[in-house]
Amino acid sequence: MTVPSLPQYFTGTGDLFSALLLAWCHVHADNFPLACEKAIGSIQGVLGKTVEYTKTLKNVGEPMTLGELRLIQSKKEIEDPVLRFHAEEVKWEETS
């Protein structure tokens, strides 16, 4: 999957991705690509809410708090993610 990066620093995205992928793999045990798409969709939703929040602060608060993920506020995005990016199968060739 190719996903564009955001020009902001976030704390905890790796941990969140791991938890989401594990959860979506449990829900879609027979469809790993869909589990990946939903994990990425959930992450994108959380990051979107976080970016919206940081825009309202305008130099208020500590810089480290600006990247804290808005998890509670993103409940809907976590449970029902919008799938903007899709997994594509890649054929690996062995080299000798």
Image (cartoon, grey):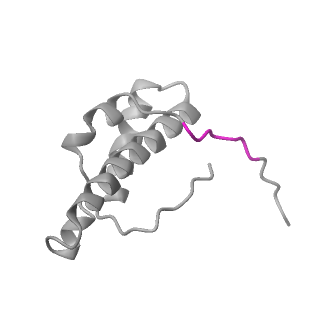
Q: Residue at x 33, y 29 (%)?
A: 79
Q: Is residue 54 left or right of residue 39?
A: left
Main SS of the magenta part reads loop
* The C terminus: image quadrant: bottom right
What residue is rendered at 34% in x and 56% in y?
51
Residue 86 within the magenta-colored segment of the rendering: yes
Position of residue 86 in the picture relative to residue 11 (left or right): right
- In this view, the residue farthest toward the right is 96
Q: Nearer the viewer, residue 82 or 90?
A: 82
- Where's residue 45, x and y in %? 39, 43
Q: Residue at x 35, y 57 (%)?
A: 13
Residue 88 image-quadrant placement: top right
52 displayed left or right of 6 = left
Residue furthest to the left in view is: 61
Magenta-colored stretch includes residue 18: no
For residue 34, above or below residue 54: above
Q: Position of residue 65 (x, y in %)?
A: 19, 67
Query: Between residues 18 and 71, which one lies in front from this camera angle?
Result: 71
Q: Residue 72, image x and y in percent?
A: 19, 42
Q: What span is in magenta? A: 84-90
At 24% from the left edge and 50% from the top edge, which residue is drawn?
A: 70
Q: Is residue 18 above or below residue 67?
A: above
- Image quadrant of residue 4? bottom right
Residue in the foreground of this view, choosing between 95 and 3: 3
Q: Residue 86: give x, y in percent of width and height.
A: 62, 38
Figure disc tally: 0
